[in-house]
């Protein structure tokens, strides 16, 4: 039997062990008991709370409670457990009032159409004005907390200069479910991009492990040994003479810079990609002069996360969103088409 109520330290969730639960680990027992009343409490979150000394147990009515700090403790029938759920701590970083293009939002998650130029998460050199700062300010009290901190759960990232769809979780349960879906590759992700040259064949699969570059540690590269398995499927949507093409790319895996590295490896780097996109004058000459000049000086990698789909972490309902090309890529496409 599970119940809950307030306390000065936070919320108290209670459970009296039934005979059918005898011998179970206490973290597993409480995770099942609180699944309906506290869906934000994943088993890993309960385990952490227990290790932090937030679980008290009474053997019988009126008995002095004891602290249980071992998640592997085996429960007995009739034991009365009280788990203190601390109020979420203030987020670090802090929220900032930054305009967001919200595609979808409910109590578990939020989907954003991120503009190019916005960093997803604070890091050295980008301490603020990030998507996380904006989400903390926007979501406010609707964030029940990730790991006890009132912040959004970022389960995947796209590069600063890539535009498009990003999902963030609002609670531990959604964060755990979405993280598992991404790890199992149960996510639909499709990108639109513009590359130099015309890939041959027009549709295909690029497969190659990706790891850090041996000399330039800020770059990724295809490696012969080690690295992480990576698979990218592409198909050509539009060709612009012999000089450029618009592609759709579907990811089986989600490695750092995966599309950029894979397309550069087959000789078709993204337009605007100064890290992986070295382009010769001979290749630029395959486009009309005005188009080649515009593409040569395009200010960011021409990559957009256009489609995102997954099963909703609470309901299991299939969810899918699609966002059109942003204005700068529409302009690039127009220039390439002449």
Image (tube, rainbow, N blue to C red):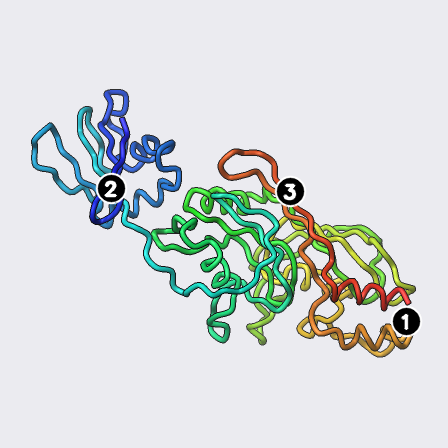
Mark closest to the chain's N terminus, 3 or 2: 2
Q: Which image quarter is the C terminus in?
A: bottom right
Query: 10 Å neighbourhood of mark 2: few (<14), some, or many (≥20)?
Result: few
- The disc placed on residue 6 is 2
Residue 165 on image: x %, y %: 62, 54
Give the mark nearer the N terminus: 1 vs 3. 1
User: Going 84% across and 53% down the picture, which residue do you hit?
Assistant: 202
Q: Is residue 78 above or below residue 187?
A: above
Compared with 331, 185 (above or below) is above
Residue in front for this viewpoint, 112 or 200: 112
Q: Secondary structure at mark 2?
A: strand
Find residue 286 and name its label: 1
> Which residue shows up at 58% across the image and 47% down it?
104
Left or right? Give the position of 211 relative to 239.
Answer: left
In space, the residues marked 2 and 1 are separated at their CA atoms by 70 Å
Residue nearest the observer in this picture, 112 or 80: 112
Q: Gap between marks 3 and 2, in whole Å?
A: 38 Å
Say which residue appears at 65% left-offset and 63% top-offset. 162
Q: Front-most of 167 and 207?
A: 167
Residue 320, disc: 3
Q: Point out which mark residue 176 bears.
A: none
Residue 153 point in image, percent of width and height? 46, 53
**Rendering coords of residue 112 (x, y %):** 59, 54
Give the residue displayed 52% in from the left and 66% down from the top: 130
Q: Earlier in the sequence, mark 2 or mark 1?
A: 2
Residue farthest to the left? Answer: 63
Quadrant for residue 301, please give it.
bottom right
Of the pair 126 and 253, the residue shown nearer to us: 126
Q: Is residue 301 left or right of residue 1?
A: right
């Amino acid at each position: 039997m599970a119940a809950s109520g307030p306390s000065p330290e936070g919320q108290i969730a209670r459970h009296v062990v039934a005979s059918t639960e005898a011998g179970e680990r206490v973290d597993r027992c409480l995770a099942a008991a609180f699944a309906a009343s506290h869906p934000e409490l994943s088993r890993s979150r309960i385990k952490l709370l227990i290790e932090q000394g937030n679980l008290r147990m009474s053997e019988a009515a009126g008995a002095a409670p004891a602290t249980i700090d071992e998640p592997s403790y085996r429960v007995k029938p009739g034991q009365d457990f009280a788990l203190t759920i601390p109020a979420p701590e203030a987020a670090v970083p802090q929220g900032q009032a930054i305009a967001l293009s919200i595609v979808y939002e409910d109590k578990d998650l939020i989907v954003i159409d991120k503009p190019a130029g916005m960093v997803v998460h604070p890091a050295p050199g980008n301490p603020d004005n990030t998507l996380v700062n904006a989400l903390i300010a926007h979501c406010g009290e609707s964030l029940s907390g990730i790991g006890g901190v009132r912040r959004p759960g970022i389960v995947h990232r796209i590069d600063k200069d890539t535009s498009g769809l990003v999902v963030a979780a609002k609670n531990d349960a959604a964060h755990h479910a979405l993280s598992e879906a991404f790890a199992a590759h149960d996510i639909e992700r499709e990108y639109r991009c513009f590359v130099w040259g015309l890939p041959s064949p027009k549709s295909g699969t690029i497969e190659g492990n990706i790891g850090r570059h041996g000399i330039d540690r800020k770059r990724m590269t295809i490696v012969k040994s080690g690295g992480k398995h990576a698979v990218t499927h592409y198909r050509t949507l539009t060709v612009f003479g012999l000089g450029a093409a618009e592609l759709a790319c579907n990811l089986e895996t989600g490695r750092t810079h995966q599309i950029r590295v894979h397309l550069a490896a087959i000789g078709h780097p993204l337009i605007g990609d100064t890290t992986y996109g070295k382009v010769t004058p001979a290749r630029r000459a395959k486009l009309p002069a005005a188009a080649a000049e515009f593409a040569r000086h395009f200010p960011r990698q021409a990559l957009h996360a256009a489609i995102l789909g997954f099963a909703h972490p609470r309901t299991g309902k299939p969810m899918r969103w699609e966002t059109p090309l942003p204005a700068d890529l529409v302009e690039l496409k127009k220039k390439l088409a002449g």
